[in-house]
Image: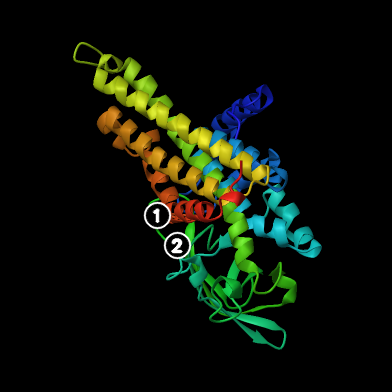
């Protein structure tokens, strides 16, 4: 990969997005209710044309979008990302009829999407899915449970991954597009640390037909993994945006806050911590950008790069936000403070879309595969 730098057009667009996040999206986010879908915020993302970009953006553009929004309004970033995650299987594998029914409403912010993969006993091991799709004379009946599903139970439709062939592991999973009003589908909200909506879904003989299949029967796991490979670097971008916001707040605070006869920034223990925060943030940013660029270029090592980007960026963001809280002191723990908000937001990305431990497993697997087949290793 070449040394990475943004061009002036990309830099200007990021600055514009940060301004939009602070001036137009933040006020709407503040009016929302924690743990609930903020539909006015989603609609504003649609009016600004940002949701429409989800369907055409490359991985790098998606990263720039998520990082810039996260810097000024994590709620707007998350609302946009969840629309992208829930809709990506439809974009990559949906029929013309499926796309025509849902994509215009998603782009306009009128319809809320959700990606329903995780289950009570199938989180990190996604191939262990147990939600059953039992054949009947019209298609299948879905029975089981999904849990820790962002935007549930308020989404308008779900991309649901269910087992159509028992004992086949990842090869027996089918992706379905399931509208929220299907009979037998119910849900409940879960109270979680992160402020965005997360819930559980129960499927009681929910009817689906061939018209609801995304892609091919028994080939849905590939749809899920393609979605995650595209979004993993952008989860890293979300983390980088939060880290940068925490770093910026820390620079301002330590420059003006006086203690022991001078500003905090004059204390070597403080300035060295800030230097470490900045260095780690920049390293994470560059790894995210190169992983996204590799995805856009169709590189063979995308799984490894995506896993590295998500791993480093989310772990870095945790370190930077925690350090920022430490340097701010008790004020950062007060409800409503930026860092109190970021502290709650920053923990979840180390778990969802593949926990840190899963990313390390992916990286190691890819490295050993390259060792066994060096002729296939990208230059």
Q: Quadrant of the C terminus?
A: top right
Disc 2, SS:
loop
Q: Residue furthest bottom?
A: 137
Tell which of 361 and 336 is nearer to you: 361
Residue sitting at x 41%, y 51%: 356
Specify whether 262 is left or right of 147: left
Please name the residue shown 71% across and 57% down the image: 92
Which residue is located at x 38 percent, y 45 percent?
Answer: 344
Q: How many marks are shown on the rendered structure?
A: 2
Q: CA distance from mark 2 to mark 1?
A: 9 Å
Q: Earlier along the polypeptide chain: callout 2 or callout 1?
A: 2
Above/below status of 211 relative to 81: below
Q: Nearer the viewer, residue 74 or 27?
A: 74
Is 8 located above or below residue 150 in the figure? above
Q: Report which residue position mark 2 lands on.
A: 124
Question: Looking at this view, is 73 or 291 the one in front?
Answer: 291
* Residue 74: image location, x then y, percent: 50, 40
Above-or-below relation of 50 to 269: below
SS assignment at label 1? helix
Question: Which quarter of the figure has residue 258?
Answer: top left
Residue 86 lies in what quarter of the image? bottom right
The image shows residue 240 at horizontal and vertical percentages of 48, 36
Decide: few, some or many residues near mark 2? Use Cα within 10 Å; few <14, some 14-19, many ≥20. some
Query: Which picture quadrant has residue 17?
Result: top right
User: Residue 306: percent from the left, percent from the top?
Assistant: 54, 47
Q: Position of residue 13 (x, y in %)?
A: 65, 28
Provide the residue designation for mark 1.
357
Residue 155 visible at all: no
Q: Given contact means CB atoms under 8 Å apart, are the residues at marks 2 and 1 in contact?
A: yes
On the question of residue 282 being in view, the answer is: yes
Residue at 73%, 45% (x, y): give it: 56
């Amino acid at each position: 990969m070449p040394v990475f730098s943004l061009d002036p057009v990309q830099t200007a667009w990021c600055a514009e997005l940060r301004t939009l996040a602070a001036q137009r999206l933040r006020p709407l986010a503040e009016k929302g209710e924690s743990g609930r879908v903020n539909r006015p915020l989603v609609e504003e993302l649609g009016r600004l044309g940002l949701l429409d970009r989800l369907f055409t953006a490359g991985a790098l553009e998606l990263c720039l979008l998520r990082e810039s929004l996260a810097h000024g309004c994590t709620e707007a970033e998350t609302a946009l990302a969840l629309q992208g995650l829930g809709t990506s299987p439809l974009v990559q594998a949906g029929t013309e009829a499926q796309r025509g029914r849902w994509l215009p409403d998603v782009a306009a912010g009128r319809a809320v999407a959700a990606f329903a993969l995780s289950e009570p006993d199938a989180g990190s091991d996604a191939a262990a899915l147990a939600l059953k799709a039992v054949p009947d004379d019209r298609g299948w009946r879905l029975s089981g449970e999904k849990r820790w599903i962002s935007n549930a139970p308020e989404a308008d439709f779900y991309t649901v991954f269910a087992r159509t062939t028992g004992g086949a592991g990842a090869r027996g999973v089918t992706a379905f597009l399931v509208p929220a009003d299907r009979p037998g589908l119910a849900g409940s909200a879960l109270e979680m640390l992160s402020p965005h909506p997360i819930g559980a879904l129960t499927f009681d003989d929910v009817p689906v037909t061939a018209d609801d299949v995304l892609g091919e029967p028994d080939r849905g796991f590939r749809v899920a993994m393609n979605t995650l490979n595209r979004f993993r670097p952008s989860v890293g971008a979300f983390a980088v945006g939060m880290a940068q916001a925490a770093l910026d707040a820390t620079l301002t605070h330590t420059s003006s806050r006086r203690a022991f006869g001078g500003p905090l920034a004059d204390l070597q223990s403080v300035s060295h911590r800030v230097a470490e925060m900045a260095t780690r943030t920049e390293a994470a940013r560059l790894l995210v950008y190169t992983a996204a660029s590799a995805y856009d270029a169709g590189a063979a090592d995308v799984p490894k790069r995506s896993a590295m980007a998500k791993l480093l960026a989310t772990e870095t963001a945790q370190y930077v936000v925690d350090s920022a809280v430490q340097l701010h002191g008790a004020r950062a723990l007060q409800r409503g403070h930026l860092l109190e908000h970021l502290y709650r937001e920053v923990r979840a990305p180390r778990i969802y879309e593949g926990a840190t431990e899963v990313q390390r497993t992916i990286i190691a697997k890819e490295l050993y595969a390259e060792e066994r087949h060096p002729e296939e290793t990208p230059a």
